[in-house]
């Protein structure tokens, strides 16, 4: 684990109380820590999170040493209102990143978009906006479901109805998360998935098209169900998640860090 990752975990533990006993909460803490770590690695004074949801990541950013401006952006007014909490000097904007952000060109040191890409109707429009607002040498941190995961590769070999049954075995709502297997079931909603996600090779090829260079990428997540994860001893969860993340092969999500071309980078 990099020093920045340990510091990110400590930051999340200190400021977010999501509940260590909940498998979903632990998963969220891991995701947030992964997004914070690249920001801790360099001088990033102005940081923006697109798809800020309930504001957990943005709140942590606002308490991070070296960050003077932390802004959360979401297209859902209700979530924006729920994000505002006393004691966290974060700002929030109601905006749709695909339609343009009310931010100056090259004004952002780091842009975070965690579990956003799969919801976008026009991913290219978002990446063009990222190109515009991130300064040369700045960073884009992105997470999304992994289309090259071992789980999806296995499901693609099954008859469609079998794959659908497996995907919805834990919960019926999961059909909204897998358009490859169910089609676009939430065409008019920002909460459904438009695409299944992306793979590391796809994102590596995409970066230069939008003025970025790939800095690093990995897969992360669980190769088994949340139900099984919830039965593991608490102390084993973090250790196992870290070991799986270090393997960087075939897990359920990806995390990529891009650097904006035209600068010396942030190391």
Image (cartoon, helix red, strand yellow):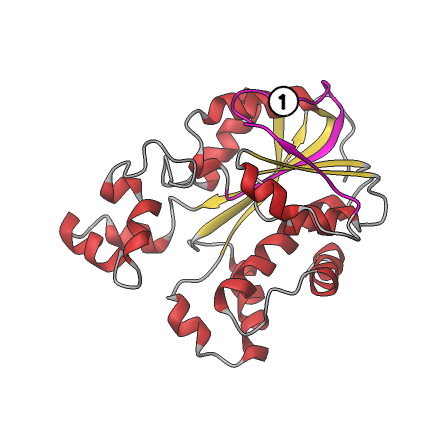
Can you see residue 178?
Answer: yes
Q: Quadrant of residue 77?
A: top right
The span picked out in magenta is 89-115
Image side of residue 151 versus residue 3, left or right: left
Q: Quadrant of the C terminus?
A: top right
Instruction: From this view, report whether residue 15 is shown above or below residue 56.
Output: below
Residue 95 sits inside the magenta stretch: yes
Residue occupied by mark 1: 131
Q: Nearer the viewer, residue 41 or 93?
A: 93
* Residue occupying image coordinates x 48% and y 58%: 221
Residue 49 percent across, percent down from the top left: 64, 39
- Label 1's element? helix
Percent coordinates x, y for residue 165 in the rendering: 20, 57
Q: In the displayed image of the protein, which residue is found farthest to the bottom?
A: 233
Q: Quadrant of residue 28?
A: bottom right
Q: Look at the picture and state if 25 lies above or below 200.
A: below
Residue 256 visible within the image:
no
Is 112 contained in the magenta span?
Answer: yes
Query: Is residue 133 left or right of 229 when viewed as pictured?
Result: right
Q: Where's residue 244, x and y in %?
A: 51, 63
Rendered location of residue 120, percent (x, y): 44, 31
Which part of the image, by quadrant, shows the N terminus? bottom right
Q: Residue at x 32, y 37 (%)?
A: 186
Residue 163 lies, with reference to residue 106, above or below; the image says: below
């Amino acid at each position: 684990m990099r020093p920045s990752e340990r510091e990110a975990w400590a930051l999340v533990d200190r400021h977010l109380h999501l509940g260590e006993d909940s498998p979903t909460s632990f998963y969220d803490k891991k995701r947030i820590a992964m997004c914070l770590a690249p920001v801790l690695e360099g001088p990033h004074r102005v940081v923006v999170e697109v798809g800020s949801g309930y504001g957990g990541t943005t709140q942590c950013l606002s308490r991070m040493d070296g960050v003077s401006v932390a802004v959360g952006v979401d297209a859902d007014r209700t979530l924006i209102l729920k994000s505002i909490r006393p004691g966290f000097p974060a700002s929030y904007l109601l905006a749709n990143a695909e339609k343009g952000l009310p931010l100056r060109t090259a004004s952002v040191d780091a842009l975070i978009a965690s579990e956003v890409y799969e919801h976008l109707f026009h991913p290219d429009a978002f990446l063009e906006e990222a190109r515009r607002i991130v300064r040369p040498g700045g960073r884009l941190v992105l997470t999304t479901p992994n289309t090259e995961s071992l789980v999806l590769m296995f499901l693609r070999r099954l008859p469609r109805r079998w794959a659908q049954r497996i995907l919805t075995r834990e919960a019926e709502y999961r059909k909204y998360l897998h358009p490859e297997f169910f089609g676009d079931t939430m065409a008019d909603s920002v909460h459904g998935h438009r695409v299944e996600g992306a793979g590391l090779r796809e994102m590596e090829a995409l970066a230069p098209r939008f003025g970025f260079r790939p800095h690093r990428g990995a897969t992360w997540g669980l190769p088994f169900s949340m139900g099984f994860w919830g039965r593991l001893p608490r102390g084993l969860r973090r250790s196992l998640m870290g070991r799986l993340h270090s393997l960087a092969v075939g897990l359920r999500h990806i995390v990529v860090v891009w650097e904006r071309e035209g600068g010396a980078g942030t190391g």
